[in-house]
Image (tube, rainbow, N blue to C red):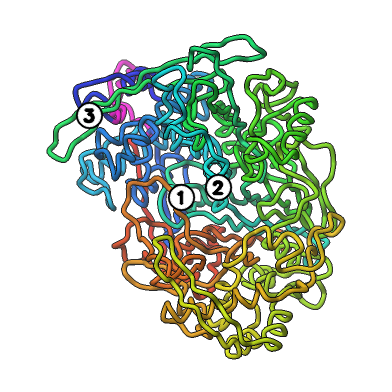
Amino acid sequence: MAAALGAVALVAAACTPGDGPESIPLPTSPDTTTTTTAATVSETTTTSAPEPPAYEATIRRTTGSVPHIEGRDVDDLAFGQGYVSAQDHGCTLVDQILKIRGERSAHQGPGADGQNVESDFAWRAIDVVGVAADDFAAASQDVRSEFEAFAAGWNRRLDDGDGDLDGWCAGDDWIAPVEALDVYAYARSVALLASSANLTDFIASARPPAAPDAAPPGGAPPSDDATAEGFAALAPPVDVGSNGWAIGAERTEGGSGGMLVANPHFPWEGELRFAEVHLTVPGEIDVYGAQLVGLPGVGIGFTAGAAWTHTVSAGHRFTAYTLDLAPGSATTYLVDGEPREMTAVEHTVEILRPDGSFDREARTLHRSEYGPILDFPGVGWSSERVVTYRDANIDNDEFVELYADLLDVSSLDDVVEAHRRHQGVPLFNTIAVGADGRTWYADTSATPNLSAEAELLYIAERDSGEGLTSLAAASGVILLDGSDSRFRWEEVEGSRDPGLVAYEEFPKVERDDYVFNANDSFWVPSDEFTLSGDHSVMFGRQGIAQSMRTRQNAAVLSSTNREGLAGDDGLFSPAELRGAVLDNAASTARLLRAPVVEACRAAPIVEVPELIDDDGAVALPAQTVDLTPACDVLAGWDGRFDLDSSGATLWRETLARFDRGDLTEAGTLFSEPFDPERPTTTPAGFTADPAPVLQAMARAVQTLRAGGFDVGSTLGSAQFTSRTGDRIPIHGGTDLEGVTNVVSWSSRGTSGEEAPTRGDLVVPGGELRGDGYPINYGASFLLVVDYTAGDPSASAMLTYGQTGLRDSEGFAAPTIRFSEKEWRQVAWTPDEIAADPELDETTVVEP
């Protein structure tokens, strides 16, 4: 993540009004020509041998088009990875560079409903490109060289394509070479995924009221409902998550070595896809794994001595602040009663119109000492109050240094030390295992540091049940009083940046049996114990009920072997671990299916009233529903979300009528309340009043029939993804259902690529769409690493495949393999690579 010379000037130009897109172009690639030199030897002038190439990488593609890149040093590897990135996902990177530079409107037009214009203003206000340019001067030469090499490789592929890329952007005039700063700044923007990047909808429209006494937008005072909806939008993304398992020597067959499961749940479309890669410098680096497309290195992976993965942390990457405004000035806020002026910055965006002409729009956006001002739903910007925020990752240049260090780790201790030294993980827990059989879990995320006094004040306000702070907490957002200096972040020794929690205070544990995380807070990293302690409230809450997916993770890994997936001996073999990853059993079915069937058979005739949709039309009629056939279906269901599972769709539509609260507390579904002493097994017991469940089941029957499905329809007949026009059945369930193998639909992503869409809901309150259950998100890069035989052995799946080229011959094949639960043995050794039946070798050189 570095920049070429002159990058700072380019960034400045990107924020200056011009005459059209040519005033803010993507920069051209640096001159890569070389010359030979002459030398005089024994008074005879001869031409010396040519200088070695600046970059040289050998790319061997194996089954699934996985690239194994070999070079002389890290720069060669980055060059090869850049070349591959431009081959497989070139459009995505250049599109994202336009996004973060706030230049999409100038090259791609305003977008639907002006979305590109809004995005451009937001990203210019965030100014991640400006921050990246400043940080480049302090980056290590190794990091600068790595990103320069990646950009050179990307541009080499662009040159090989005569200035064009394959894929959805082919032929577009906004395709251009990239510089190291472009890639660096994009990587820095990825670190903002759970903070600034999640707030862009509220930044671009933030304007002070026209008159000092003006009301919030809409002319009405803020309502609790509108504000609650706003906090829900600000909350950490629930659809970006993962499972991570590290199995220690105590739980592996043979009792030596460890095993790791990486199972990130990320989008199958857009910029948040993974690319699989193997990087080798003989005798120095040998690392395999995956990285988000468009970036160098490995984010999740393994070496001969250690393996690591990540899950999105339940902690907080930013704090939102309310600001009390000074009377008579909506751009002056108060801190401890003293006035402070906001910083006003004018931004001008160029907009390409359909006829080829350009116009401009200028906006003045404001910042507080914390960060950008937000146009927060239900609060807006009145004469009395506004909302702002501070981001824990805007200054995270250590993020890059950390992942550069992970390329050559040789032990679990190396992994831990890299995290301690850099503290650069932006928003993830880390779950790791060593070849020696030790495991490690830590919430390694960048976390704001509040003083003990501030935490007590915040907790009291949060738990009061009144006010904005309490409303925000219900949606997982930390809201503080920015006009009280006690809520500023506290600076302590040893932290990565001022105001963050230092490494020594991170929740962490090392074990010889196992650890896991499934996106609940650090508090429950195992079925065997809880990780209590005096940890900051910013890491997430302790003593609270766990999600159904966390409970299923715990049941699978528990020493009691509740799911029986570790075999009769309770110790995992590699085959058993691979089977557990895609077992598809649902904790909700394990806990509730049998009593629901019993209640259903006791009272199968259910009266349901009319269901009215948002437009006032009858979505489902009042009806007497006989549940007897549905009872029989659930009685015969094995509780799994496999393709041939008859009962999974009925169960899904039944659960859709309940919310997460019903699954974490006693009442509607459970009779026994949550017990913090038994966090992975409570709440439990079936409710004393099954009537709401039977009503929900009757609605499920109606919904399935309205959608053209029988109550006994299999999951594979309804759940699918589209690849090159083909409908591929997809197994797996959801977090709510308590399935570890998560697949669902996500609306996240900012790619300009046109992607598959889904049909409308059959009825409100259900999950079934007119086309079934379309999937575009979930299990993405699946990896099982095994050290029990000494040298690593690994199996993998990349559910959507290595390429983004939809018309390529192999575009659908990886998804079909996932549908069939067909693991691919990772080609790790030179002999395994050479023996691969689909081996294809290329050497790329610059110049």
Q: Amino acid at mark 1?
A: Arg
Would you say the magenta stretch is mainly helix, strand or loop? Answer: loop
Give the quadrant of the C terminus.
top left
| Label 3 neighbour load within 10 Å: few <14, some 14-19, many 20+ | many
* Disc with the residue nearer the chain's start (3 vs 1): 3
Q: Position of residue 637 (x, y in %)?
A: 63, 84
What whole-number distance in Å separates the C-alpha atoms at marks 1 and 2?
Answer: 9 Å
In the structure shown, which secondary structural element does the residue marked by tag 1 occupy?
A: loop
Image position of 833 (left or right of 578): left
Label 2 SS: loop
Q: Decide: is 557 above or below 291.
A: below
**Residue linked to disc 2:** 237
> Horizontal and vertical percent for residue 393?
57, 31
> Magenta span covers which residues?
26-53
Q: Are marks 1 and 2 in contact (CB under 8 Å)?
A: yes
Q: Residue furthest right?
A: 677
Write the residue at 24% across / 46% down: 161
Crowdedness near tag 2: few (<14), some (14–19) or many (≥20) residues, C-alpha within 10 Å: some
Residue 49 in magenta stretch: yes
- The quadrant where residue 419 appears: top right
Mark 3 or 2, nearer chain start: 3
Residue 748: image tag: 1
Residue 21: image tag? 3
Q: Is residue 652 above or below residue 301?
A: below
Name which of mark 1 and mark 2 comes first in the sequence.
2
